Image (spheres, rainbow, N blue to C red):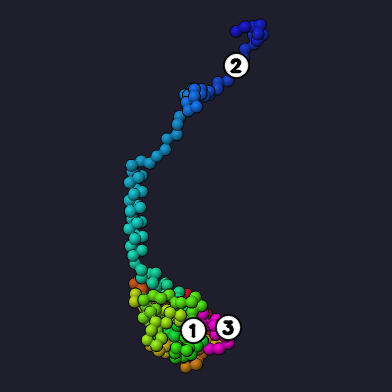
C-alpha cells in the first residue's frame, strides 16, 4: 500500500459488504453466500387432509341444500308473522277491526269475519308469493286470489296451537280493533296464543301476546 498516498501507518479497514453484480436486464448474480431463497409449500399429508375435510364439508352442505323442509318451515312462519303484524298495523291505520284468517291451512287478512270476495285485503307487495300451497289455499270464488294478503301452508309444514281454540283451525280467525288489541272469534279479549310451526326436526314458536297483540318468535 502506497504510504505517500495514505500516510505512513495509515490502514483503512473497509467493512465487508454483500454485493450484487448486474450483468444484464434480467441477470443478477448474488455474491453473498449467506443469501438463501425462501422455500414454502404443502406436504402431501397436509394436502390430503385438506381434501378430506373439504369432502366432508361438501357432503354435509349438499345434504342440507337438498333438504328444503327447514327453509319451508321458516319461510311459512315468517309469512304468518308478517300477515299478523300487517293486520294489526292496518287496523290502527284505518281505525277499524281487521281480521286474520287462521284456519290451519293459511293465514290471510280480511276486513270481515267471513273473508268474502269484497272483504279480502290486498297485499301491499302487489301479489302474494304464488306458491303451489298459496294457489291451493288462497282462493276466492273458486279461483286463486293472487292479490290477496294470504299465504298457504306448505305440505311439509304443520302448524299447531298451544291450546284448542276456535281462533285457530277449521274456520278459525281472530281480529284486531282500532287500538291494535287482539280479540277472540267471539269478541272477548284474546289470551296469548302460541303457534308451533314444525317440519321434520325443525320447529319455531310464534307467540301472539295478549293485550298488545305483538307477534314474535
Q: Which label is found at residue 13?
A: 2
Q: Tell me the CA gap for discs 1 and 2.
A: 97 Å
Percent position of residue 215, x then y: 50, 79
Q: Residue at x 53, y 89 (%)?
A: 97
Mark 1 / mark 2, whichever is N-terminal? 2
Looking at the picture, does residue 58 appear above or below residue 185? above
Residue range (magenta): 84-97
The disc placed on residue 85 is: none
Nearer-N-terminus badge (3/2) = 2
Q: CA distance from mark 1 to mark 3?
A: 14 Å
User: In front: mark 1 or mark 3?
Assistant: 1
Which residue does the image show at 66% across and 6% down from the upper left? Answer: 4
Q: Could one spot residue 34 in this view of the protein?
A: no
Image point 54% across, 83% down: which residue? 90
Q: Nearer the viewer, mark 1 or mark 2?
A: 1
Which label's residue is closer to the chain start, 1 or 3?
A: 3
> Quick check: can you spot residue 42?
yes
Q: Is residue 214 above or below residue 4?
A: below
Numbered tag placed on residue 93 in the rendering: 3
- Tag 3: Cα neighbours inside 10 Å, few (<14), some, or many (≥20)? few
10 Å crowding of disc 2: few (<14), some (14-19), many (20+): few
Image quarter (top left, top right, bottom left or bottom right) of the N terminus? top right
Which of the pair 51/194 is nearer the observer? 51
Local secondary structure at mark 3: helix
Real-space CA distance between mark 3 and mark 2, rounded to the nearest whole angstrom: 94 Å
Q: Is residue 200 magenta?
A: no
Where residue 8 appears, as percent x and y from the top left, is: 66, 7
Q: Please, what is the dominant secondary structure of the magenta stretch?
A: helix
Query: In the drawing, what numbered circle is on residue 121?
Result: 1
Amino acid at each position: 500500500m502506497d504510504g505517500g498516498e495514505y500516510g505512513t501507518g495509515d490502514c483503512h479497514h473497509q467493512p465487508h459488504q454483500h454485493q450484487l453484480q448486474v450483468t444484464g436486464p434480467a441477470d443478477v448474480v448474488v455474491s453473498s453466500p449467506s443469501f438463501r431463497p425462501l422455500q414454502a409449500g404443502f406436504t402431501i399429508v397436509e394436502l390430503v387432509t385438506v381434501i378430506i375435510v373439504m369432502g366432508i364439508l361438501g357432503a354435509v352442505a349438499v345434504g342440507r341444500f337438498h333438504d328444503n323442509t327447514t327453509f319451508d318451515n321458516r319461510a311459512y312462519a315468517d309469512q304468518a308473522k308478517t300477515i299478523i303484524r300487517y293486520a294489526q298495523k292496518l287496523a290502527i291505520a284505518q281505525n277499524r277491526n281487521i281480521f286474520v284468517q287462521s284456519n290451519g291451512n293459511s293465514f290471510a287478512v280480511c276486513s270481515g269475519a267471513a273473508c268474502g270476495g269484497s272483504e279480502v285485503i290486498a297485499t301491499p307487495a302487489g301479489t302474494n308469493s304464488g306458491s303451489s300451497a298459496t294457489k291451493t289455499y288462497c282462493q276466492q270464488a273458486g279461483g286463486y286470489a293472487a292479490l290477496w294478503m294470504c299465504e298457504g301452508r306448505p305440505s311439509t309444514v304443520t302448524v299447531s296451537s298451544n291450546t284448542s281454540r276456535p281462533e285457530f283451525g277449521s274456520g278459525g280467525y281472530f281480529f284486531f280493533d282500532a287500538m291494535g288489541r287482539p280479540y277472540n272469534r267471539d269478541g272477548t279479549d284474546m289470551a296469548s296464543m302460541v303457534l308451533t310451526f314444525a317440519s321434520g326436526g325443525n320447529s319455531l314458536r310464534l307467540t301472539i301476546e295478549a293485550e298488545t297483540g305483538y307477534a314474535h318468535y
